[in-house]
Image: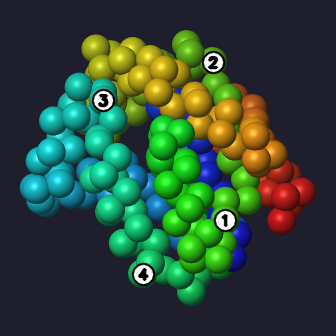
Amino acid sequence: MFNIVIFGPPGSGKGTQSVKLKEKYRLVHLSTGDILRDAMAKKTPLGVKAQEYMGKGELVPDEDVIGMLMGVLDENMDSNGFIFDGFPRTEKQALFLKKNLEKRDTMIHALLTLEVKREELIKRLIDRGKQSGRSDDKLSVIENRINVYHDQTAPVIEFYQKLDKYYPVAGMGTIDEIFDRLCGVIEEVK
């Protein structure tokens, strides 16, 4: 089983690249954002709670995200592996994930971090908001989302650096150029 975390600030291309990586390596794509948005659309109790946080550009509490994610993980333990997209977002979540994967006799093999300039992130998110209508892609929320990423999720990078599993990848360029860079790292790590 091969497991990776695709990481980066909002708008860095994690979702786009995850879909391509999922297809190439036949991995299960675990996108906390997609799972939460689905719960919001269905107006489940988690979805209603998540809407309050995400509407302000804040992170959904750990206990909600973790419970949801572990359920999906356990349903797919016979897969080739997982792409974690949007999780872990805090050092606490990274430690939790490490311990829970060890219990299942597997681990994270690489944290692939898409590095994109702030101005480009804002442009991408505004464009995506115009196309998708996502409420968290409005300019008033975008700045907060990027700040939350840098304040709360950047320590995750340090966590994986200590484990020698951190791989920064240039997230600027075409989708295919970025994909080729990610695949190059994966081929080295596998």
Q: Residue furthest bottom?
A: 78
Nearer to us: label 2 or label 3: 3
- Earlier in the chain: of badge 1 and badge 3, it is 3
Measured as percent of width and height from the top left, residue 80 is found at 65, 78
Which one is closest to the eye, mark 1 or mark 4? Answer: 1
The kind of residue tagged 3 is Glu
Marks 3 and 2: in contact by CB < 8 Å? no
Q: CA distance from mark 1 to mark 4?
A: 17 Å
Contact (Cβ within 8 Å) of mark 3 with mark 4: no
Q: What residue sits right under mark 2 in the picture? A: 117
Q: Using a 10 Å C-alpha cutoff, classify the residue at mark 2 as few (fewer than 14 neighbours), some (14 to 19) or many (20 or more).
A: few
Which quadrant would the C terminus be assigned to in this image? bottom right
Look at 10% across and 56% down and name the residue there. 45
- Mark closer to the chain start, 1 or 4: 4
Q: Secondary structure at mark 3?
A: loop
Q: CA distance from mark 2 to mark 1?
A: 30 Å
Query: Is residue 74 among what the camera can see?
Result: yes
**Is the Cβ of the residue at disc 4 closer than 8 Å to that at disc 2?**
no
In the rendered structure, which amino acid carries the disc numbered 1? Met
- The residue that disc 3 covers is 58
Judge depth for marks 4 and 2 and give the one in front.
4
**Residue behind mark 4:** 75
Amino acid type, residue under disc 2 in the picture:
Lys
Tell me the distance, in whole angstroms, between the alpha carbons under discs 4 and 2: 37 Å
Which badge, 2 or 3, comes first in the chain's sequence? Answer: 3
